[in-house]
Amino acid sequence: MRYDLIVIGSGPAGQKGAIAAAKLEKRVAIIDRSHSQVGGVCLHTGTIPSKTMREAIMHLTGFRQRNVYGERYREKRHIKMADLRRQIAYVLDHEVAVIHDQLDRNGVDSY
């Protein structure tokens, strides 16, 4: 048998289960619908994109910086969807890379 455990779904629970089994010296594979989009719904359509959008808006409007810099801080007057999409894509790409690195470091094959 090639694997001791095959985990279906690469969301947070799948990742943790796969890595925990690998640390117990089990041969583990994790399978998801799209190999390039590990992370599940939480990462791609749920929590992470919505929180990233919220944080990007707060940053671009200067909401947090006003308390630090006062009137000297100049916020962006016109926020475009392209600004938000760019920030979301950056965060998602980073998070996918982190997940792939964690799986690779622990010897978990992903399909």
Image (tube, grey):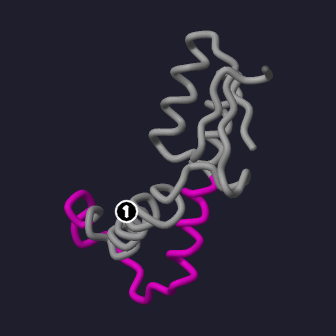
Image location of residue 7, percent across then percent down: 60, 36
Q: Where residue 102 sits: x, y (%)?
A: 61, 30
Give residue 90's quadrant in the image. bottom right
Q: Is residue 106 above or below residue 80?
A: above
Instruction: Decide which of 41, 72 is in the foreground and name it.
Output: 41
Q: Please state, as top left, top right, bottom left or bottom right, where the N terminus lies in the image.
A: top right
CA neighbours of label 1 inside 10 A, class few (<14), some (14 to 19), many (20+): few
State the residue lying farthest toward the right.
2
Q: Is residue 101 left or right of residue 71?
A: right
In this view of the protein, which residue sits in the foreground, 47 or 41?
41
Q: Is residue 100 magenta?
A: no
Residue type, numbered disc 1: Lys
Looking at the image, residue 42 lies above or below residue 74: above
Left or right: residue 72 versus residue 28 is left
Numbered-mark total: 1
Identify the magenta region: 66-93
| Residue at the disc numbered 1 | 51
Q: Secondary structure at mark 1?
A: helix
Q: Residue at x 54, y 77 (%)?
A: 83
| Secondary structure that dominates the magenta span | helix
Image location (x, y in percent) of residue 64: 26, 62
> Which residue is painted at 57% across and 82% down in the image?
82
